[in-house]
Image (cartoon, grey):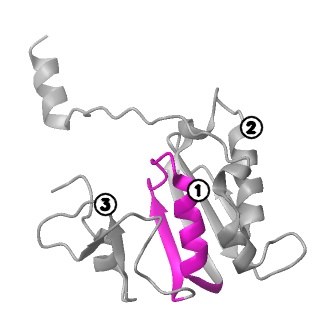
Amino acid sequence: CRLRGECRLSRSIPQRVINIDLYSCPGANVTICNMAQTPLSTGSVDAVVMCLSLMGTDYPAFLREAWRILRPDGFLWIAEIRSRFEERKGDRGAIDRFLKEMRRLGFLCTSEKRPSKMFLTMTFAKRGQDDDIQTDETRAKRPLKSTQWPRLKPCLFRKRKTQGELLAEAANH
């Protein structure tokens, strides 16, 4: 199984990792559930990693759940496809709206990077309460649709050719 639920991160670090996904590979240690409703307790984790996890149209619910399960001052790391945030190369409209809504949710962006031409990574710290942030109780009651979350562009998946396929194709021409 090479598509989802491989748990590579959890096998590569000594810390305890809880793997959550909608899918799992046979034998993988993955809790299968909707990321908007995990079985984890409030404030029970130090860090959340979301790698290509914002594919659902209800992605704001995933982010709200990350906020709920993170301990105070916990970290959220997101890696997504850059083009999902850009109408045209260099456009910052959607990313700026996304960062604004993350602040409203209670996250402080500590890093925004473009490590390659395809990916965007962002690191956030869960902030405590202040005038700009709602309390846990009001945050839980506020409907997600009342915010201005950007509509992220769909990601079109295509099978990439392996190096062997490319060499064979070149040899045939």
Residue 167 at what x, y percent from top left? 15, 28
Dot 2 falls on a residue whose secondary structure is helix
Determine which quarter of the picture holds residue 38: bottom left
Q: Which residues are magenta?
A: 44-72
Nearer to me, 61 or 24: 61
User: Residue at (35%, 70%) from the top-left corner?
Assistant: 20
Residue type beneath disc 3: Leu
Q: Earlier in the sequence, mark 2 or mark 3?
A: 3
Q: Are marks 3 and 1 in contact (CB under 8 Å)?
A: no
Asked whether, in this view, residue 132 is left or right of residue 101, the answer is right
User: Residue at (74%, 37%) from the top-left corner?
Assistant: 93
Q: Are marks 1 and 2 in contact (CB under 8 Å)?
A: no
Residue type beneath disc 2: Gly
- Label 1 sits on residue: 60
| Disc number for residue 93 | 2
Asked whether, in this view, residue 58 is left or right of residue 140, the answer is left
Magenta span includes 71? yes
- Label 3 sits on residue: 22
Front tag of 2 and 3: 3
Determine which quarter of the picture holds residue 161: top left
Residue 168 at what x, y percent from top left? 10, 25
Separation of marks 3 and 1 at Cα, in angstroms: 16 Å
Dot 1 falls on a residue whose secondary structure is helix
Q: Earlier in the sequence, mark 1 or mark 2?
A: 1
Separation of marks 2 and 3 at Cα, in angstroms: 30 Å
